[in-house]
Image (cartoon, helix red, strand yellow):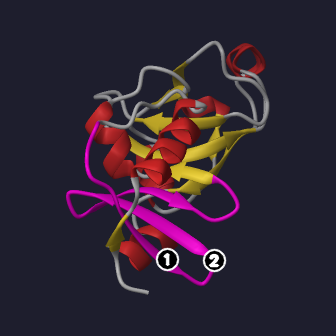
C-alpha cells in the first residue's frame, strides 16, 4: 500500500500511544505506510513511529524531541555494540531514569544525548545501577535494523 496521510482521529490515537511512553508528538501532518501487518508513521518524510506488536518510537523521533523520561545513558565503549544490535549490559550504563521498571520500554542514548537505540529493560533502574552486572536491556530498535531498512 502506498504512503498516505492519516486522519486526525488516527493521529490522536497515535499521540495517546506515545504519551503512554512519555513522548509528545509535535502537532504535524502524519503519513502512514503499511506492509504485511506492520505500520510506520512518517513526519516530514522521516519514519517516526513503527507499529507491529507494539508501538516503537524511532531514532528519528527520539533525536528530534530528546525525551527526558525512560532514558538510559551508556558509555562510549558500548555504542558500537548497540549500533550493531547487541543488547545493553549493566556495566556500560552511566545513568538512567530512576522510574524505569522491569519490562519498561527505554530509550538508549550516548553521553552527548544522541539516541542510538530502543530496548526493553530486564530489571528495574535501582537493580541495574546497584548490581552493575549482566544483561540489562534487550534491544528492539537500532540503526540499520529491519525498521530502518524497510522504511528509510
| Residue 8 x %, y % | 40, 49
Figure check: 1 above or below 99: below
Front residue of 14 and 45: 14
Residue carrying label 2:
37
- The circle drawn on residue 34 is 1
Q: In the figure, is residue 123 to the left or right of 63?
A: right
Q: Residue at x 41, y 35 (%)?
A: 109
The secondary structure that dominates the magenta segment is strand
Figure check: 36 above or below 140: below
Q: In the figure, is residue 130 to the left or right of 40?
A: right
| Residue 15 x %, y % | 48, 39
Residue 145 in view (yes/no)? no
Q: Quadrant of residue 45?
A: bottom left
Q: Is residue 106 magenta?
A: no
Q: Residue at x 50, y 21 (%)?
A: 69
Front residue of 54 and 88: 54
Instruction: For marks 2 and 1, give the CA distance.
Output: 7 Å
Give the class, few, some or many, for how many residues have Cα within 10 Å of label 2's Cα (few <14, many ≥20): few
Give the class, few, some or many, for how many residues have Cα within 10 Å of label 1's Cα (few <14, many ≥20): some
Q: In the figure, is residue 72 to the left or right of 148?
A: right
Q: Residue at x 55, y 51 (%)?
A: 56
Figure check: 45 above or below 127: below
Helix, strand or loop at mark 2? loop
Q: Quadrant of the C terminus?
A: bottom left
| Residue 60 x %, y % | 32, 50
Name of the residue lying farthest toward the left: 44
Q: Which residues are magenta?
A: 27-54
Amino acid at each position: 500500500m502506498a504512503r498516505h496521510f492519516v486522519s486526525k482521529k488516527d493521529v490522536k490515537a497515535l499521540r495517546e500511544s506515545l504519551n503512554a511512553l512519555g513522548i509528545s508528538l509535535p502537532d504535524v501532518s502524519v503519513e502512514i505506510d503499511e506492509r504485511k501487518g506492520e505500520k510506520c508513521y512518517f513526519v516530514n518524510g522521516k519514519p517516526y513511529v513503527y507499529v507491529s506488536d507494539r508501538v516503537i518510537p524511532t531514532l528519528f523521533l527520539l533525536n528530534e524531541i530528546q525525551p527526558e523520561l525512560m532514558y538510559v545513558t551508556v558509555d562510549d565503549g558500548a555504542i558500537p555494540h548497540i549500533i550493531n544490535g547487541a543488547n545493553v549490559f549493566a556495566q556500560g550504563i552511566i545513568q538512567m531514569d530512576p522510574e524505569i521498571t522491569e519490562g519498561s520500554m527505554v530509550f538508549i542514548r550516548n553521553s552527548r544525548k544522541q539516541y542510538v537505540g530502543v530496548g526493553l529493560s530486564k530489571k528495574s533502574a535501582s537493580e541495574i545501577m546497584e548490581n552493575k552486572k549482566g544483561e540489562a536491556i534487550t534491544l528492539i530498535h537500532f540503526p540499520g535494523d529491519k525498521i530502518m531498512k524497510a522504511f528509510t
